[in-house]
Amino acid sequence: MNETRVEPSGYVRAGAEEVADLLRARRTAVITGAGMSTDSGIPDYRSPGAPKRTPMTWQQFLASEERRRRYWAGAALGWRRFDDVHPNRGHLALAAFEHRGLVAGVATQNVDGLHQRAGSRNVVELHGHLRTVRCLECGAEEDRDALVRRLRREHPAVLECSRSAEGNPDGDAEIPADVLAEFEVPVCLVCGGMLAPNIVMFGQFVRPQDARAAELLVNRADALLVAGSSLAVNTAVRLVHRAHRQGKPIAIVNRGATPCDGLAQFRVDAGVSEVLDGARALLG
């Protein structure tokens, strides 16, 4: 069994055994972040040492056709990063915990859909998802796979870009200037209006219905587990503080410190998939 140690900050450092004990004793709500999906091959841009990234804001996307051209050209290439990934042991463990009634549901900051693919049923996608895109004028939606196939068919030069250009996923992929110059921004197939990804971009707010669903998830649970989130975004921090105000035990599994460590009953500084899979093995 891992030794449990009390750190100077007052929280307890623990391991998979403590996570298993938490889940065994209480029905738990889970918040997940980018660290949940790193073992699936999706980069975490917030951890120490992560590659620098300057994401496009919602305001930039709306205001500039050049920015939209960059986003959709990047999506046509960078979609490979999401198309090729699969749920990891951590995703599968959370789905198994939910099926056993140990986990009430997951509120995720991720847009990759891996929780659902792993079998989780009660998932609140705080930052949206990549499965579809929507028209800002008529509201029609198009399947993201279908859109990417359309973009690749109409702009085959995108696929000829080197793998090095594909370093970032989805719309953050870097595309050479000569390819961008020939790229046409896609429009809605129904009305010809402006298409946008169904995600919460920087500069946007979480949809009220999603924020409320996450709050209800925390309200109805007996404890809160944070898995793979640096808690650098207020969306997740508010949920942690909500659980704290309600006097519920809080556990954090994350590589590196978070601003909410002082509120945690215990914290595991390790990879999410190994810890959750370890807890799954202990629970039988």
Image: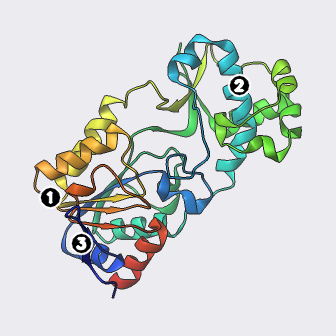
Label 2 residue SS:
helix
Name which residue lies at 41% across and 71% down.
Answer: 276
Instruction: Note whether residue 112 is visible.
Output: yes
Q: Where is residue 135 in the image (x, y as percent from the top left)?
A: 56, 20
Query: Which comes sooner in the sequence, label 2 or label 3?
Result: 3
Please tell me which residue lies in front, 267 or 282. Answer: 267
Mark 3, other Cα within 10 Å: few <14 / some 14–19 / many ≥20: many
- Residue lying at the far bottom of the rendered structure: 1
Query: Which comes sooner in the sequence, label 1 or label 2?
Result: 2
Mark 1, other Cα within 10 Å: few <14 / some 14–19 / many ≥20: many
Query: Which comes sooner in the sequence, label 1 or label 3?
Result: 3
Gap in angstroms between the C-alphas marked 1 and 2: 44 Å
- Residue lying at the far front of the rendered structure: 8
Gap in angstroms between the C-alphas marked 2 and 3: 45 Å
- Residue 133 appears in which quarter of the rendering? top right
Disc assigned to residue 70: 2
Label 3 residue SS:
helix
Name which residue lies at 70% across and 25% down.
Answer: 70
The residue that disc 1 covers is: 248
Judge left or right: residue 127 versus residue 112. Answer: left
Label 1 residue SS:
loop
Q: Where is residue 51 in the image (x, y as percent from the top left)?
A: 62, 46
Say which quadrant the N terminus sits in.
bottom left
Q: Tell me if residue 172 comes above or below residue 282 in the rendering.
A: above
The residue that disc 3 covers is: 22
